[in-house]
Image: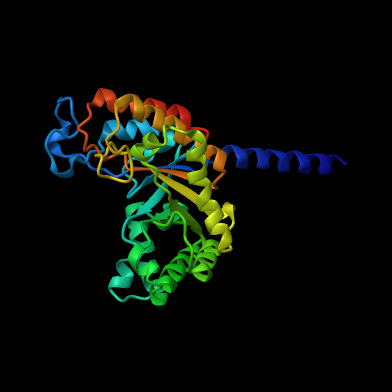
Amino acid sequence: MRGAILLIALLALSFTVSVLGAKQLNFDVYLAICPATAKAAGPYCPPKTKDQLCFCEHDFKRINSQGNHYISVTDNGHKDEIEKAGNAMSYYVNRMNDGYYKKQSAKAFAAALYQDACKKFDGCNKVPKWWILNEISASKWAAANVKYQKYVVDLTAALKAKKLNVIVAAPFDEPKRAGKYWKALSKLGYIGVENYVSGKELKAKKFSLSWLKAQYKKSITAFARLGVPKSRLFVFESYGSTLPSKVFGRAGIAHKEWLNTIRLRAAAIKAAHYKGFIGYGWWGNQMKESWNLRDKYYDVYLKTHKSLP
């Protein structure tokens, strides 16, 4: 009896440690885009650079201040800081189509990607288990290019064989075709739905929360029709201070309107119940916002998004 009690206690302890060690499937993509001019004490980030892209140490510290989630990185340069904050690394791969363009087999390209990751993270045993692949070619997939569709599925299969959890970024918020390949992809990994609702769009709908909820839920419905369950879907959303001409991010709306958009997005995404959430695009600063205002956006984002998914 004593042995049985001890076994139960050990199992309970093991389960508790496992739960405590698990992270929310809540990801922030970190890309080091910090022009030399942005390192100065000036009020803008960056003051004068092409496309006004900026993601510096200050930005990293803000997204890393939220614990118990994943920071998607391209190498292990911030490993210690990430782990100290109670977060974990995931690997952001921004060249998933290179193998296809170079006419490599998906299996061979997956092997090359994995070996490259082993170098970037100081050993294969230290490679993050969660990978984000960016991104499916919208034109090739929409054109029903079966060779390309099979490449995407086979690449995901080869990485899964390495015991990796793969999220494939997909620029389709309401797919209507290629169910065979979407379904196959979802059985091997996860689909990261790029369902971007810009601030400008939401403003046009008078900041309607019910309308916004419907936008995020429509992707779940569309993929379900193709045989992909909600449990295999992540959702991307973009947080750059973009110009009015853009269909993602802020799209030129005023400061208070953008703060409201960030809050409403969190509520709507939470209501949709995706498997996970991926915050993206903070490096966009085409509206040339000051560090002070950018921090206000981070404050609201961190407060409202920490409970996602």
Counting from the top left corner in percent of width and height, residue 210 is at 52, 36
- Front in this rendered view, residue 97 or 145: 145
Kindly tell me whether residue 152 is visible in this rendering. Answer: yes
Q: Quadrant of residue 146?
A: bottom left
In the depicted structure, whether residue 93 falls above or below residue 12: below
Q: Quadrant of residue 303?
A: top left
Specify the color scheme. Answer: rainbow
In the depicted structure, whether residue 294 falls above or below residue 72: above
- Residue positioned most to the right: 1
Instruction: Please give the name of the residue rendered at 41% of the width and 32% of the height, measured from the top-left corner.
Output: 206
Quadrant (top left/top right/bottom left/bottom right) for the N terminus = top right
Lateral position of residue 108 relative to residue 242, left or right: right
Instruction: Please give the name of the residue rendered at 49% of the width and 34% of the height, measured from the top-left corner.
Output: 209
In the depicted structure, whether residue 155 falls above or below residue 278: below
Kindly tell me whether residue 67 is visible in this rendering. Answer: no
Instruction: Please give the name of the residue rendered at 43% of the width and 54% of the height, measured from the top-left corner.
Output: 131
Counting from the top left corner in percent of width and height, residue 287 is at 22, 34
Label count reads 0
- Front in this rendered view, residue 268 or 273: 268
In the depicted structure, whether residue 141 falls above or below residue 73: below
Instruction: Please give the name of the residue rendered at 53% of the width and 33% of the height, measured from the top-left corner.
Output: 307
Counting from the top left corner in percent of width and height, residue 136 is at 38, 62
Counting from the top left corner in percent of width and height, residue 3 is at 82, 43
